[in-house]
Amino acid sequence: MRRLCKIHFLLNTVAMAALTVGMNAAAPPAPSPQKAAAKPKVIAASQSPVKNVPLSKESLACLECHRESATPAATKQWAGSRHATAGVGCFECHHADKASATAFDHNGFSITVLVSPRDCGRCHAKETKEFEASHHAKAGQILGSLDNVLGDVVEGIPAGNSGCKQCHGGVVKVVGPGKLDAATWPNTGIGRINPDGSRGSCSACHSRHAFSASVARQPENCGKCHLGPDHPQAEIYAESKHGIAYRAKIGEMNLDSKSWVLGKDYSAAPTCATCHMSATPELPLTHDVGARISWTLRPEVSLKLDHWEARRADMQKVCANCHGSDWVQGHYTQYDAAVNLYNDKFAIPAKAIMKKLRDAGKLTPTPFDEKFEWTYFELWHHEGRRARMGAAMMGPDYTQWHGFYEVAKNFYTEFLPQAEELLPGVTAEVKAMDDHKWLQGLSKEDRAKIESFYQKRYGK
Ligand code: HEC
Ligand code: HEC
Ligand code: HEC
Ligand code: HEC
Ligand code: HEC
Ligand code: HEC
Ligand code: HEC
Ligand code: HEC
């Protein structure tokens, strides 16, 4: 009991501050009918938080065991959270209607281990609605993709379960009352397909049991998934002036502040969240990470999204807090030019050659059973994405050496020669394009220029 009192004391000492500002943000939940009974008890700000325990009796019962004999460290994380100070205890998140697929009896309480966005949405309707409308919520629907053949078939199911699905989210299977199939659980992939029909996992960004905004604001949080050979956003950011400024000034980022409006609460550097999600004086916080991007850089050939002008205008409003409009327009001019270069010079021609080879029956319908298909896959899925993504977010090394250099090397020394071997003549039209004419040899003048450069620089 002494320990329990300590938790209450901790709660209560921090409660004052949080309670006065706290409750209105989580506008009264619209509880689903079956869960209405469990609406959390919340103490009124006018009452002394010392006398009033801001927790439901059910949550107090959870703490009886969980403060000591079960998951004591996780309980401490919760005790330091805004939820704790707002009276949101274990039971408020974990209770489940007996009829729900993941419910089980736990020491007299009907609870679920899996807490879905629908559960969080009882109190956070706005965030949940925006999240559900985003690409993040759709990230579990990758079954039909080429990558999925790669993960589940070419590599094997356990690779997909511990790899792809830990980022994208998989289907969580229920195998008995409250019993989740261990091949599908744990999983906090961003587009997890939950037994209640909802999509996603809020704890993909809001790590438990603190569920803090501050963790989610940090670039490392996005970097669990946004890194590596096919989408190195974390590395690009680290390389960029924005990432440098962030690391140098992290102490000035005010990450723990409740309000986090660019230019008001912090100004040292933008993080991933700043540009893609967070509030500025002109823009509200959004949980739709696609709201401010104009291109999609994922497919073989990049496309502009619907309403791309409005999305781009919003991103530029973020930049305008720190940069002048010519600077920002100049960046977008360079970025568009890089994407168009990749599309027109490499991606569209490569795609056309692939089609000709398929039409001529030179490739089997099975993906990844021929070397050439790997060559092509890496051209757009790895190298081509890196080049485009580097240009989007000011990472020159990813644009160049990990990007266009690799694209060009693959295109000229692997893709074109391998295609030519499969079907002689298939690359002729592409090679005749102005962009590729240099293959026929540099002019005498160009060669002389190179010679004289090295002469002057190194004296040989
Ligand atoms: C009588 C003690 C006791 C009470 C009361 C209790 N728990 Fe537990 N709980 C435990 C123990 C012990 C475990 C660890 C079991 C294990 O190791 O799998 C546990 C495990 C859990 C798990 C994880 C289950 C899993 O399968 O991964 C959750 C979630 C949980 N408790 C939530 C709650 C909530 C919410 C309450 C209050 C409504 C509560 N507990 C009340 C003792 C208790
Ligand atoms: C704000 C909602 C929320 C609150 C409050 C909360 N939990 Fe959880 N809990 C979650 C989420 C989300 C997960 C991860 C499951 C998922 O991804 O769906 C989780 C997972 C767990 C797990 C299983 C995961 C593991 O690491 O073994 C245990 C045990 C658990 N919670 C116990 C507790 C206890 C005890 C409390 C109170 C001290 C508590 N939770 C309070 C949301 C909450
Ligand atoms: C480290 C986390 C991670 C792993 C592992 C991972 N992905 Fe992804 N995947 C991502 C991210 C992040 C994106 C989006 C990148 C972007 O928008 O720049 C993505 C994009 C995709 C896309 C493109 C979706 C679209 O809308 O165009 C598909 C398809 C895909 N992944 C499938 C897979 C498959 C299948 C696997 C396993 C073979 C896998 N991924 C492994 C994080 C991951
Ligand atoms: C892609 C990462 C990500 C996911 C997934 C995510 N959030 Fe957030 N969330 C953030 C970030 C970043 C912030 C802090 C933004 C800020 O303060 O500028 C935040 C802030 C919040 C806040 C505080 C809002 C405020 O006005 O202070 C709530 C509540 C919240 N999220 C709920 C949710 C819920 C519910 C889900 C699941 C439906 C969810 N989040 C999923 C990144 C995420
Ligand atoms: C019973 C209602 C309730 C449920 C369920 C609930 N929350 Fe909250 N949440 C709150 C309240 C109240 C606050 C405090 C608001 C404040 O301080 O302004 C809060 C605050 C937050 C914050 C802001 C924390 C910060 O550091 O500023 C995040 C993020 C958040 N919740 C995410 C979640 C997620 C994710 C879930 C589901 C796993 C969830 N919440 C479930 C009521 C709830
Ligand atoms: C748990 C993994 C995960 C985390 C964490 C994550 N993402 Fe993603 N993100 C993905 C995946 C997977 C996709 C691709 C979804 C698809 O197209 O199917 C994606 C797509 C995106 C997109 C493209 C959206 C669109 O509409 O095209 C943006 C932008 C993005 N994420 C930004 C972020 C930011 C910013 C954060 C951190 C605040 C973050 N993500 C955290 C996995 C993650
Ligand atoms: C200075 C602002 C800024 C920062 C910081 C930033 N981004 Fe971006 N991001 C952009 C811009 C601009 C684009 C391109 C938008 C467009 O196409 O119009 C972009 C594009 C993206 C895309 C879309 C890729 C696709 O497949 O279409 C993803 C995903 C993404 N960023 C994730 C991240 C992650 C993760 C971080 C942090 C590690 C981050 N961003 C940091 C501005 C930023
Ligand atoms: C919070 C302020 C902030 C925001 C928001 C911001 N930047 Fe920056 N940006 C900086 C700082 C700081 C630098 C580094 C300046 C220096 O090195 O002198 C920088 C540098 C740059 C550079 C130069 C990169 C280089 O390598 O020299 C470009 C281009 C740029 N930003 C574009 C943008 C664009 C486009 C956006 C919006 C998508 C944006 N920035 C948003 C603060 C910001």
Image (tube, rainbow, N blue to C red):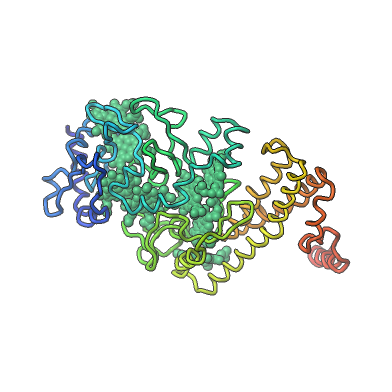
Q: Give me the residue at 39% from left, 29% from top.
A: 174
Most extreme residue toward the top is 176
Q: Quadrant of residue 148?
A: top right
Q: State how many labels appear.
A: 0
Left or right: 302 as drawn, with respect to 261: right
Q: Position of residue 224 (x, y in %)?
A: 49, 44
Q: Position of residue 377 (x, y in %)?
A: 66, 45
Q: In front here: 264 or 331?
A: 331
Q: Give me the residue at 44% from left, 40% from top.
A: 192
Q: Position of residue 136 (x, y in %)?
A: 46, 48
Q: In front here: 411 or 420?
A: 420
The quadrant of the picture occupied by the C terminus is bottom right
Left or right: 100 as drawn, with respect to 276: left
Most extreme residue toward the right is 444
Q: Quadrant of ligand 3?
A: top right
For residue 226, say whether it is visible.
no
